[in-house]
Amino acid sequence: METIRRQLAPLIVGRQVIDADAHPSAKFATGVEAAGAAILAVERRGKYLLIQLDDDRELVIHLGMTGRLQIRGSATAPDPYVRAWWDLGGERLELHDVRRFGRVAVVDRSDHSSMPTLAALGPEPFDPAFTGAHLWAALRASRARVKTQLLSQRPVAGVGNIYADEALWRAGVHPERRTLGRAGAGALRDEIIQVLATAIDRGGTTLRDYRTVEGATGTNQLHLECYGRAGEPCLRCGGTLSRLVVDGRGTTVCRTCQPLRGRVDTRQVN
């Protein structure tokens, strides 16, 4: 989403929403309420895109599992999987979502009370508030597995399944651990930041549906060190990576480098 935000902002900021339309589902229908407003900024919170409007409201977009945003000419042939569109005068911003897992809403600026998941997000990974001490305290407050907590978005916003596996492997933390010491939490915090920063620099990770605003794929999938590599050698110890299911989510782990107890030295990871 950060890659999309960076690409989208220069294309739509300052433009007027001339018209809008949306699928009648409650998940998309309120998107039409952005018509008539001008776009002031494009921000992000976790996996939500927050498009700031000039009437003290914001257009909130969540892509779900299969959604993508694209800019197309207003006269382009209709796409049956476009769930909402906003006419910017000659071009349209379109939300393409085959499986309708996405979400659109127009709300008063910063009022996310109608969207509990967004309202409950933890700090952004690049926010100074996201410290090792914060992560240690957040994980300590729950008995859920560490990976499950990361995916809940409460200890930190924006970590999905791919980046959770990558960060946990780099930090030497088993995804089924339920507690971490201060040092382990600090190491995991550092690896979360590094993994996400690198992925953003590479334009994101495309395994199936994800596309940039320009329709291109990311390149981070070419550099994954753990996620999706079950059965292949661990890049740290040479052992065979395993596949687990952790609270319903497919997970890749090195049982040697990520013991259920203790922590290994990860300094040799490139």
Image (spheres, helix red, strand yellow):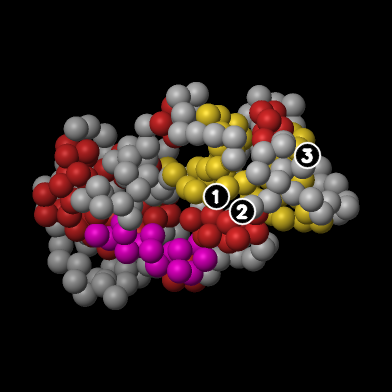
Residue placed most toward the observer, 183 or 112: 112
Disc 3 secondary structure class: strand
Closer to the chain start, of discs 3 and 1, is 3
Q: Is residue 200 magenta?
A: yes
Q: Residue 146 location, x and y as percent?
A: 26, 43
Residue under label 3? 19
- Type of amino acid at the residue the image marks with label 2: Val
Quadrant of the image occupied by residue 55: top right
Within 10 Å of the Cα at label 2, are there few (<14), some (14-19), or many (20+) other Cα atoms?
some
SS for dot 2:
loop
**Quick check: marks 1 and 2 in contact, CB under 8 Å?**
yes
Figure quadrant of the C terminus: bottom left
Q: Write the start and end of the magenta stretch as one range.
A: 190-209
Q: Please state which amino acid type lies under the numbered disc 1.
A: Ala
Magenta segment, prevailing SS (helix, strand or loop): helix
Locate residue 267, reporting x and y percent.
19, 71
Amino acid at circle 3: Asp
Task: Decide which of 15, 122 is in the foreground and name it.
Answer: 15
As measured in the structure, the alpha-carbon distance from the residue carrying label 3 to the one carrying label 2 is 16 Å
Return the residue at label 1: 41
Circle 3 crowding by C-alpha within 10 Å: few under 14, some 14–19, many from 20: some
Residue 47, horizontal then vertical, whole percent: 48, 45
